[in-house]
Image: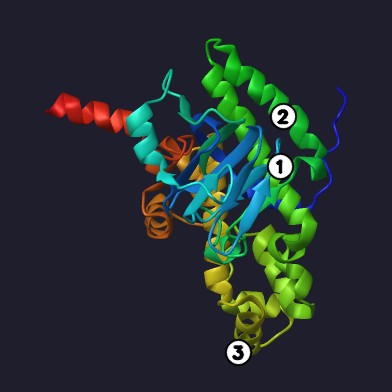
Amino acid sequence: MTRLASPPHDAVSDVLRTFGVRSTILCISELGAPWAFSVPVAPVAKFHIVLNGQALLDAGESSIALAEGDLVVLPHGVGHTLADDDGSAATPLEELIDEYGLDGGLRLRYGGSGPLTRLLCGGFALSEGIPDSTLRLFPNVLHVPCEGAPWLAGLLAELDEEADSGRPGASAIVAKIADVILAQALRFWLVDAKWDRLADPRRMLEGPIAKAVSALETRPSEPWSLDGLARHVGLSRSALATKFRVGVGESPIRYLSGVRMRQAASELAGGGLTLHEVARHAGYATDAAFAKAFKRQFGKPPGAYRDGAGDPPHIEFVSERVEQAHHDS
């Protein structure tokens, strides 16, 4: 048997594994100029891909001209408008879908008789295990121009072919390709300017505190206490507590809890371990103690989290809501 070497460790890969991008395609919009639509602020992150033509994005502080093949990601779900130019009046996207419907449940056709723009629009969710401090580092708008990302053109060609094929399973394949595109977009941003702050905060730590963080992250299942960690790094209990809070922003034990919970969420989403095994890996002596801590962190028990880990973010189709309203009446 040939033993395959493990891929080299790098912090960006660790971050991408933690993110666990899952997308839902809202619609493919075929828009003849003049056209414009608005999308309200929402807790679900959004993305738009220009399959053909061009568009102008206005997200408040950001106004970006999008060319064919460009991708724009709005990680925080900020409100925004898309238009053929800045002179077109925007209509809420929900109203357009309500009025014009979605052909085949996926395709919106709207606008005038001018040049055609085709957009793939959707939402996505990131793993619930990501700390808020990490999510806050993402910009409101992440623009990935096709010309600056050679990987994007090939993926877009595959996505466009599947979207137009009408073959069984096409919508599922389109969603999977969109997941890859979004993961690539996040990597694009990480390695471009911000990755050193986001991917590996230990780069900014030195000496005993860096050693403490490394111990907690690489051996989270050990029964660490403040006294034990202080002895491990050669500091007094009070010195460790003070220096750790200054360098990391929280206490060592609270940081350890976050590491354990993120590891547990990742293992539950993977589905390969029992709840008992996940609890032991997270350093908990009993399943009940683990379940209580996990629910406090994520708002749901570990079993329910595992059962729903593969679900995409919920984005309600306006056509479905209208159909349900007619049914109820």
Q: Residue flagged by tag 3: what amino acid is it?
A: Ser
Residue 155 marker: 2
Q: Residue flagged by tag 2: what amino acid is it?
A: Leu
Residue bearing mark 3 = 238
The quarter of the picture where the N terminus appears is top right
Q: Nearer the viewer, residue 33 or 99?
A: 33
Q: Nearer the viewer, residue 176 or 64?
A: 64
First-in-chain label (3 vs 2): 2
Measure the C-alpha gap from mark 1 to mark 3.
43 Å
Residue 157 marker: none
Badge 2 marks a residue whose secondary structure is helix
Instruction: Please state the horizontal and vertical placement of residue 154, each as a whole percent of the image.
Output: 76, 28
The quarter of the picture where the C terminus appears is top left
Badge 3 marks a residue whose secondary structure is helix
Report crowding for label 3: few under 14, some 14 to 19, many 20 or more residues within 10 A (C-alpha): few
Looking at the image, which residue is at 41% across and 24% down?
Answer: 102
Q: Residue flagged by tag 1: what amino acid is it?
A: Gln
Q: Quadrant of residue 315?
A: top left
Badge 1 marks a residue whose secondary structure is helix
Confirm or deny contact between disc 3 and disc 2 (CB under 8 A): no
Measure the C-alpha gap from mark 2 to mark 1.
10 Å
First-in-chain label (2 vs 1): 2
Instruction: Please state the horizontal and vertical placement of residue 51, each as a whole percent of the image.
Output: 65, 31
Residue 74 shows in this picture? no
Looking at the image, which residue is at 59% across and 46% down?
Answer: 85
Question: Which numbered mark, 1 or 3, is in the foreground of this view?
Answer: 1
Residue bearing mark 1 = 184
Residue 301, placed above or below residue 173: below
Residue 219, placed above or below residue 48: below
Instruction: Please state the horizontal and vertical placement of residue 285, each as a whole percent of the image.
Output: 47, 56
Residue 97 placement, left or right of 137: left
